[in-house]
Image (cartoon, rainbow, N blue to C red):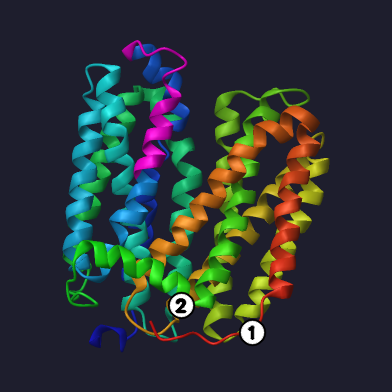
Amino acid sequence: MSNTARTLPRSTVALLAVATATAVAVAYYSQPLLEAIGSDLGLPAAVTPLIVTLTQLGFAASLLLVLPLGDVLNRRRLIGGLSVLSAFALGLTALAPNGAWVLWLAPLVGSTAVVAQLLVALTATLAAPAQRGRAVGTVMSGLLIGILLARTAAGLIADLAGWRAVYGTAAISMLVIAVALARRLPTTEPAEAMVSYPRLLGSVLRLVRQQKVLRVRMLFGGLAFAQFSVLWTALTGLLSAEPYHYSEAVIGFFGIIGAVGAVAARLAGKLADTGHSGTATWAAATMMLLSWVALVYGGAHLTALVAGIIILDFGVQAMHVTNQSQIYALPGNARSRLTSAYMTAYFAGGALGSAAVPLAAGTWGWTGVCALGAGCALLQILSATRAPRHRAKTA
């Protein structure tokens, strides 16, 4: 397409990053609000966690079922429509008269977070090839910041004005983003002609079979996000117990510490743009392994804990951006479907990591959590060592 021949303005890249952060955050706002929502709406304690589960299931389903549409529909209109739908679902949640209302809306709220991934794929399409890694890296910084700071922002707003204000503010934010994107994004034509929906979904599986680069990067991404999820799933338990005994508000601010790792995105993007993706991959994998050494000591020492969090998030983000730079360099115009396959593996890894935490923590405590994370890091390094050099096939 013609719009890939020119450099994407920095202001547009910044807007895409902010929009990505805002869009992905809607899938994470509910996590620190469960007690407040349950108490206000009379939901039993055993039921309120379903809000998070249903939200994440909606997000996962949209990665599989909605994201591929970005290759055959006008992305600008698709993103705008989903952003307005997100605002509508968030607004209805803010007005919820009972718990059932929130539970029914949760999957819809989660599914609209796919806007973030559509924006990442759109960035790769709009950016010139020599700029692509840095542009995607900047937008991915927004995604990581959105994930990490959503909990912090939700907690602060809820303390000041209640949980409904969180969803109301989010609804307004998504409407503002929809208007800003409609005004600033260039018009783009669909990457490919419209095909039947079953064939479109089937082509995602075909890409996975055909592209070894995609399969390898799906593995690396899944292992990286597994480590991210292991840390952030177990961290609340560590910080609320001895020796820290931190309050929920203090624990929420640890998301800001993790967001420091977002600076890795631009660095990894620059390496990818200059043909050093292999160096970026090894550096990211090594950093993740070393972070777990620091985190072991972080069970009793705050300095080691903070250092481990920063190093791990830095490595995860660098790996993620490098992975996406590699898959977006594949031939063809299937970037939304490539993103669908990759992000499905990415979040599957995160889900498996989170699911393994109770067993590891219950059996061996914080040491077991760190061993679990280090095991994923070692598997990642071994996979990188054994991965053969390969050329991408045409999709």
Query: In the rendered image, which residue does mark 1 sit on?
Result: 389
**Residue 96 location in percent, x, y?**
23, 22
**The disc labelled 2 sits on which kind of residue?**
Gln
Q: Does the magenta stretch include residue 54?
A: yes
Of residues 93 and 310, which is closer to you in this image? 93
Question: Mark 2, mark 1: which one is toward the viewer?
Answer: 2
Rendered-image quadrant of the N terminus:
bottom left
Query: In the rendered image, which residue does mark 2 sit on?
Result: 210
Residue 185 vertical position relative to residue 293 in the rendered view, above or below: below
Q: In the rendered image, is residue 225 in sight? A: yes
Of residues 329 and 87, which is closer to you in this image? 329
Q: What element carries label 2?
A: helix
Magenta segment boundaries in residue numbering: 41-58
Residue 40 placement: quadrant: top left
Q: Which mark is residue 264?
A: none
Residue 145 is left or right of residue 251, and the answer is: left
Q: In the rendered image, is residue 14 in sight? A: no
Residue shown at 32%/62% (left/top)?
118
Q: What element carries label 1?
A: loop
Residue 155 vertical position relative to residue 371 in the rendered view, above or below: above
Residue shown at 37%/37% (left/top)?
55
**Residue 376 location in percent, x, y?**
70, 54
- Dominant secondary structure (helix, strand or loop) of the stretch shown in magenta: helix
Residue shown at 55%/27% (left/top)?
249
